[in-house]
Image (tube, rainbow, N blue to C red):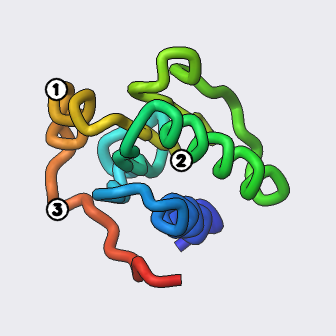
Amino acid sequence: MKLSGAFVKKIARLLIDKKAQAVRILDVRKLSSVTEFFVFATASSSVHNRALAEELRLKTKTDWKLHHVEGVEGGDWILLDFIEVIVHIFLHETRSFYELEQLWGDEMEVKFTQKT
C-alpha cells in the first residue's frame, strides 16, 4: 500500500479519536480517476463536524497537502480534499439522505484497526 493507504488509515483513526461515528474507508482506485480513497464519518452536531475537519487539517498538514475544503459554513456535510484521499464528514441525517457510500459497494471497504 502506498503512502496514501497509510495516510487514509491515519485519518480514520484521528476521526475515531475525536468521537466520529461509523467511520468507513472505501478504496475506489479501480473505479475512479479522481481519487484513491474515500473516508466517511458521522459527527454528532455541526460544531462537532467543524471540530473534526479542523482536527484533520491541523494533524495532517505535515503529512499531506490539503487541496481544499467545502461545507464548513453549513456544517452538515464537510468535504476535505487531499487529492488521493477525499474525506466526507456528515451529520447523521445528511449521510442517511445522500447515502453516498452506497454508490461504491461494500466490497471496496478497507479494514483498519479502530483502536489507536
Would you call the spot at circle 2 few (<14 residues within 10 Å), some (14-19), or many (20 or more)? many
Position of residue 4 relative to residue 100, above or below, is below
**Which mark is first along the chain, 3 or 1?**
1
Q: CA distance from mark 1 to mark 3?
A: 22 Å
Q: Are marks 1 and 2 in contact (CB under 8 Å)?
A: no
Please tell me which residue is depicted at 25% across the width and 38% down the height of the picture. 92
Viewer-proximal residue, 66 or 51?
51
User: SS at mark 3?
Assistant: helix
Question: Which three-letter amino acid code belongs to the residue tagged 3?
Answer: Glu
Q: Which residue is mark 2?
A: 85
Coordinates of residue 25 in the picture (x, y in percent): 37, 58
Return the mark for residue 107.
3
Q: Which residue is mark 1?
A: 97
Viewer-proximal residue, 23 or 19?
19
Q: In the image, is 61 to the left or to the right of 99?
A: right
Viewer-proximal residue, 83 or 48?
48
Q: Are marks 2 and 3 in contact (CB under 8 Å)?
A: no
User: SS at mark 2?
Assistant: strand
Position of residue 53 relative to residue 21, above or below, is above
Q: In the image, is 75 to the left or to the right of 40?
A: right
Question: Which three-letter amino acid code belongs to the residue tagged 1?
Answer: Phe
Coordinates of residue 105 in the picture (x, y in percent): 15, 50
